[in-house]
Amino acid sequence: MKPGPPGVARADIIPLLREGHSDREIGRRLHTSPKRVGRIRAELGLPRSVVTITRTLHQAWATFTEPAGDGHLKWTGYFREGTCPVLKYRGVDYAARRIAFEIGHGRQPVGRVLPGCDHPGCIAPPCTTDQPMRRADQLYDAIFRRTAA
């Protein structure tokens, strides 16, 4: 029987398994196949690791923002189709503006969430608006613009 391809020694994998790391994490750290790590785990009779996520959705969102001046925020994460800021959290894609709206307004948005300020690409929670807010602004303008004229 021929030996397998050269790679990470089994002796390097076993201590990380005993520390409780996941197959994927060990594979990433040692640049080896997570499937190989899983086979070694099974051979040793070690239980699968339990992944605990300590960051909340809002904390994860905040890691992809940076100040853009005057209280505005810039999104530094992924953009779907180059325009829609998206956060991947626990394997699910979330619209980053919807998260910003929840943070700023304390409720779920209704309809599409858009920036309500003139700062391009702003994702600051107070600057986000949903459909009912935009409709109320339009009604307010329609009523009071005539009065002011």
Image (spheres, rainbow, N blue to C red):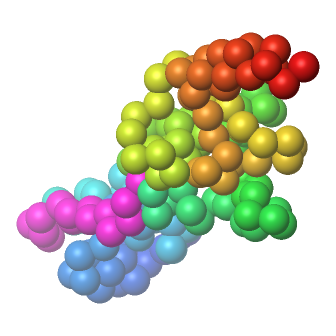
Residue closer to the observer: 124 or 55: 124
Identity of the residue drawn at 72% across and 37% down = 116
Q: Is residue 100 left or right of residue 134?
A: left
Res 91 quadrant in image? top left
On the image, which quarter does residue 41 sit in? bottom left
> Range of the magenta residues?
43-57
Give the position of the N terminus as an image quadrant.
Answer: bottom left
Residue at x 13% of width, y 69% of height: 46
Magenta span contains residue 55: yes
Name above or below for residue 47 compared with residue 120. below
Where residue 11 appears, x then y in whole percent? Answer: 35, 83
Q: Is residue 11 above or below residue 56?
A: below
Q: Position of residue 37 (x, y in %)?
A: 34, 63
Residue at (45%, 57%) from the top-left corner? 58
Specify whether residue 16 is painted magenta.
Answer: no
Residue 53 drawn at (x, y percent): 32, 63
Q: Which is the main secondary structure of the residues drawn in magenta?
A: loop
Q: Residue furthest right?
A: 149
